Image: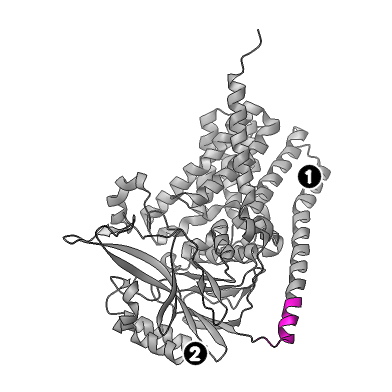
């Protein structure tokens, strides 16, 4: 092929990736977004020149898609974009190595395994920032990926990468950009895009027929139709923890709740850290906190109602009893853990609790190997200690009303494989509580809402989403968003939600595709070592 300047190819790939990303509707561009970088590799550049151009492409994608982090923290946004760029360049370095080691015939397929291994690792280590996992791109097109109930987002990543490789190889066979086999490329596009979408339609149709039969059975047995109320209080996150404002915040939450609950309401959902004090709330003694008396009175007047709410909490330990996350209280024998919690409450206090496990790097968590950066991060709103976290996926249950809630606190809702643990522990509904106001009215909170659709499809569960400043909504098991609320509005919404107990294939097994890809990369490494040790024949 005629050579094209590396700068053009690099920027083209980055811009195509960004242009395909939600909330933009041009999702189809993702199927050609990697082709410019494959063309660059075909021009045989030197290794580090190739990796450098790929890094520029990845940085363009990151900057154009996640620029909104700047509204929360300027230095943090720069760090996130740079670190993610470096990490995303590793699969391209691996591609260069595989292409040289195994030849172009196999190098592109090896790249698929390398990229998906990167995505899997990036979902499961302490510096996790999987916002740009390729399979997330279809959050804007839920009708295309109803088969996520079998594969999760890794199925979407595999689809994207495979079609990019197939289309590139069609171009490569022609040997010239001027002589393109339009028929072959058209067939590849139609089959590569149309077949998965057709499968999606068939899967959705089959699942909805099953839902209709269950609904008919429920009506025949006169099962009650209970509803869920979600509150969006629209409290400024930057003033939320200011001393003296908590009474007003609680009054707003209670007033909005009272405007929607009725005799059939069984679950009320408030956003992340809705219950808070400037120095946090001791969880074990919360029922005795006189500042929360209006809440206990409200729940006492509605005895059939339970509240799912975020809470900024802590627990005190005596020396020797502390956890591995505990921090020492100066000049005392006491230690404490801080929590970003989800609580299920009634008038008696806490019924069950869950402490956020997937913490935001730099803001809520600093991995031990980066502790030397602690003082710098604290200057920009980060933390050296962060929240204590738990490993178990605690389902928040209420036997009386049948709700078994999978709590997703903010950032956790972008982790598909992680959320399946709640389903295996018996969750029949997902409650997302979040505060997306740190970024302002940008694409950040819109992307976060759309990603929730993927969790609904993967697990075939209803989602009740309460966002402090928006966007609050209900999402049905097919990813359809209901009663989506505008940004920057105080409101409460109500929806009849059916509880599903049958688990999807993905809920039962988790992310099998990524595990196979990791195994594939290990095989490639072993093959390479064997090839390296093999001596040439004399």
Q: Nearer the viewer, residue 253 or 390?
A: 390
Q: Which residue is mark 1?
A: 185
Q: Nearer the viewer, residue 489 or 206?
A: 206
Quadrant into which the C terminus falls: top right
Q: Is residue 368 magenta?
A: no
Instruction: Please state the extent of the stretch shown in magenta in the rendering.
Output: 213-223
What secondary structure prevails in the magenta region?
Answer: helix
- Pointer 2 local density, CA inside 10 Å: few below 14, some 14–19, many at least 20: few
Residue 237: quarter of image = bottom left
Q: Secondary structure at mark 1?
A: helix
In the image, is 429 to the left or to the right of 29?
left
Mark with earlier residue (2, 1) = 1
Label 2 to label 1: alpha-carbon separation: 57 Å
Answer yes or no: is residue 138 visible. Answer: no
Q: Which residue is mark 2?
A: 259
At x 68% / y 57%, what residue is drawn?
150
Residue 128 horizontal/vertical position (percent): 47, 51
């Amino acid at each position: 092929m005629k050579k094209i300047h590396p700068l053009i190819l690099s920027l083209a790939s980055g811009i195509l990736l960004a242009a395909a990303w939600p909330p933009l509707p041009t999702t189809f561009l993702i199927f050609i977004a990697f082709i410019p970088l494959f063309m660059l590799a075909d021009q045989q550049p030197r290794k580090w020149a190739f990796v450098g151009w790929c890094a520029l492409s990845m940085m363009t994608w990151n900057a154009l898609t996640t620029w909104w982090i700047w509204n929360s923290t300027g230095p943090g946004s720069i760090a996130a974009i740079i670190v993610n760029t470096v990490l995303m360049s590793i699969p391209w370095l691996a591609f260069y190595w595989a292409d040289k080691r195994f030849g172009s015939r196999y190098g592109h397929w090896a790249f698929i395994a390398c990229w998906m291994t990167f995505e899997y690792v990036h979902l499961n280590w302490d510096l996790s920032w999987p916002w740009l996992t390729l399979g997330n791109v279809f959050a804007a097109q839920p009708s295309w990926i109803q088969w996520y109930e079998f594969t999760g987002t890794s199925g979407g990543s595999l689809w994207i990468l495979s079609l990019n490789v197939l289309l590139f190889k069609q171009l490569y066979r022609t040997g010239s950009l001027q002589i393109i086999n339009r028929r072959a490329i058209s067939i590849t596009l139609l089959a590569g895009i149309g077949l998965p979408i057709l499968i999606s339609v068939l899967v959705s149709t089959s699942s909805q027929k099953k839902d209709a039969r269950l609904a008919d059975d429920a009506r025949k047995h006169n099962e009650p139709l209970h509803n869920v109320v979600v509150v969006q209080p629209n409290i400024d996150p930057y003033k939320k923890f200011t001393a003296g404002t908590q009474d007003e915040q609680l009054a707003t939450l209670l007033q909005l709740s009272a405007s929607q609950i009725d005799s059939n309401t069984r679950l009320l959902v408030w956003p992340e850290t809705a219950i808070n004090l400037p120095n946090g709330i001791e969880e074990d003694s919360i029922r005795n906190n006189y500042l929360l008396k209006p809440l206990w009175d409200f729940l006492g007047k509605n005895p059939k109602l339970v509240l799912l709410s975020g809470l900024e909490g802590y627990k005190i330990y005596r020396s020797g009893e502390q956890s591995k996350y505990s921090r020492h209280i100066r000049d005392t024998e006491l230690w404490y853990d801080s929590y970003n919690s989800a609580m299920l409450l009634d008038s008696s206090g806490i019924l069950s609790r869950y402490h956020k496990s997937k913490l935001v790097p730099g803001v809520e968590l600093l991995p031990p190997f980066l502790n030397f950066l602690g003082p710098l991060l604290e200057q920009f709103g980060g933390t050296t200690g962060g929240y204590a976290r738990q490993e178990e996926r605690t389902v928040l249950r209420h036997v009386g009303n049948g709700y078994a809630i999978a709590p997703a606190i903010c950032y956790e809702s972008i982790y598909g494989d992680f959320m399946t643990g709640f389903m295996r522990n018996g969750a029949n509904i997902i409650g997302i509580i979040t505060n997306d106001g740190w970024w302002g009215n940008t694409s950040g909170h819109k992307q976060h809402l759309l990603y929730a659709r993927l969790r609904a499809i993967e697990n075939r569960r209803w989602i009740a989403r309460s966002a402090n400043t928006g966007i609050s909504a209900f999402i049905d098991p097919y990813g359809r968003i209901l009663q989506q609320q505008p940004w920057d509005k105080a409101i409460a919404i109500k929806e009849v939600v059916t509880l599903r107990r049958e688990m999807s294939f993905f809920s039962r097994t988790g992310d099998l595709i990524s595990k196979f890809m990791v195994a594939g990369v290990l095989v490639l490494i072993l093959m390479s070592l064997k090839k390296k040790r093999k001596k040439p024949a004399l």
